């Protein structure tokens, strides 16, 4: 099976994971709702700059991806409301009440919410390896979230973080429905819309903007952790499906916790050792997953980026074509057996 989506989701998880401790630092000078808006606005500005550069330097863009259509708008609107507005505002409000370390670990639930929604509502296949991997990653999050030295527990902060993970779980599954479309276009629209809505809410609420260097830091963090991370995440959705991508994305909170320990100089605990082992075991179970059975691809005509060495694209070109390319093409009915994930080509029932 193609391992490239694994690289995409690992990069996405790392970039998003570092956002929590750095956001905690910025919350000392930027109000919660405003910071949520700035992060997504940074995602828009960063990718807008990239788009301008690639428009002038075509050699940097080897392929074009399909643009969004009218039928994709409801999925995108749902993703913007759930993951672009509700989730980051909940996260920033929760970060005001608990430590960056605890918040990072609680974000482990995003992968679990994404996977459960994908399996229960969108009927993605889940075998024994997947559930064992999810159990391992959940166990790692639970172990790391336990602080035996804490004398009191503020329920509101954790609840806000959990709400954020649930909203992002919805967002991830809605975005999966349009993951064959241009990830940069999706992120640009989502960043501009979500950033504008959150900043508008902040301004209407009477929050003032103090223009200083922290605004620039927030935009840069948003460009990396919300913009580039989302592009990689959508690429991973194409090849892995929501459940596997969500499970792998559980690495992000673990990375965020490690960065938080470094930034805030919290003492490391022996609990990190079994947590790391469980996280590594979960990743290994998914990487080694072999889902193989006879399945049928129905005839379809569509447009998306593809290569001719993936067992699904056998059409002929007037001139030889190598590597990934983009055009409308037809698929005849095919019945075959090979190992596969629930990617955009394998959404069949079981």
Image (spheres, rainbow, N blue to C red):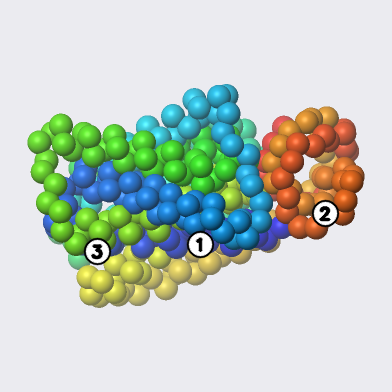
Q: Secondary structure at mark 2?
A: loop
At horizontal 58% and vertical 51% (from top left) the residue drawn is 236
Question: Eyeballing the image, is 155 above or below 347?
Answer: below
Write down the residue under mark 3: 148
Q: Is residue 336 left or right of residue 286?
A: right
Residue 11 is marked as 1
Would you identify the image quadrant in which residue 327 lies? top right
Percent position (x, y) of residue 196?
29, 37
Q: Residues within 10 Å of mark 2 (few under 14, many from 20)?
A: few
Q: Is residue 282 left or right of residue 138?
A: right
From this viewpoint, is residue 288 visible? yes
Observer-nearest residue: 120 or 317?
317
Indicate which label's residue lies in the foreground, 2 or 3.
2
Would you say the residues marked 1 and 2 are in contact, meaning their CB atoms lie under 8 Å apart?
Answer: no
Would you identify the image quadrant in which residue 182 lies? top right
Q: Residues within 10 Å of mark 3 (few under 14, many from 20)?
A: few
């Amino acid at each position: 099976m193609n391992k490239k989506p694994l690289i995409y989701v690992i990069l996405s998880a790392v970039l998003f994971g570092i956002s929590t401790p750095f956001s905690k630092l910025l919350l000392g000078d930027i109000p919660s709702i405003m910071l949520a808006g700035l992060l997504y606005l940074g995602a828009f500005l960063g990718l807008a700059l990239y788009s301008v550069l690639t428009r002038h330097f075509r050699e940097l863009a080897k392929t074009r991806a399909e643009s969004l259509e009218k039928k994709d708008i409801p999925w995108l609107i749902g993703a913007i409301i759930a993951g672009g507005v509700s989730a980051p505002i909940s996260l920033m409000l929760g970060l005001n009440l608990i430590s960056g370390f605890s918040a990072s670990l609680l974000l482990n639930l995003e992968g679990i919410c994404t996977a459960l929604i994908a399996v229960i509502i969108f009927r993605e296949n889940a075998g024994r390896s997947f559930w064992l991997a999810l159990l391992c990653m959940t166990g790692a999050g639970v172990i790391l979230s336990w602080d035996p030295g804490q004398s009191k527990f503020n329920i509101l902060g954790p609840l806000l973080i959990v709400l954020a993970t649930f909203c992002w779980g919805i967002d991830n599954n809605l975005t999966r429905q349009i993951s064959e479309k241009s990830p940069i276009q999706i992120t640009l629209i989502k960043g501009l819309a979500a950033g504008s809505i959150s900043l508008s809410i902040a301004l209407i609420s009477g929050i003032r903007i103090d223009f200083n260097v922290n605004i620039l830091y927030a935009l840069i963090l948003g460009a990396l952790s919300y913009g580039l991370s989302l592009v990689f995440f959508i690429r991973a959705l194409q090849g892995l499906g929501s459940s596997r991508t969500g499970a792998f994305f559980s690495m992000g909170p673990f990375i965020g916790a490690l960065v938080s320990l470094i930034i805030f100089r919290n003492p490391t605990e022996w609990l990190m050792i079994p947590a790391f082992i469980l996280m590594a075991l979960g990743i290994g179970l998914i990487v080694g997953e072999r889902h193989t059975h006879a399945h049928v691809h129905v005839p379809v005509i569509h447009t998306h980026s593809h290569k001719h060495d993936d067992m699904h694209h056998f059409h002929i070109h007037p001139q030889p074509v190598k590597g990934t390319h983009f055009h409308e093409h037809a698929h005849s009915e095919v019945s075959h057996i090979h190992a596969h994930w629930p990617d955009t080509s394998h959404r069949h029932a079981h």
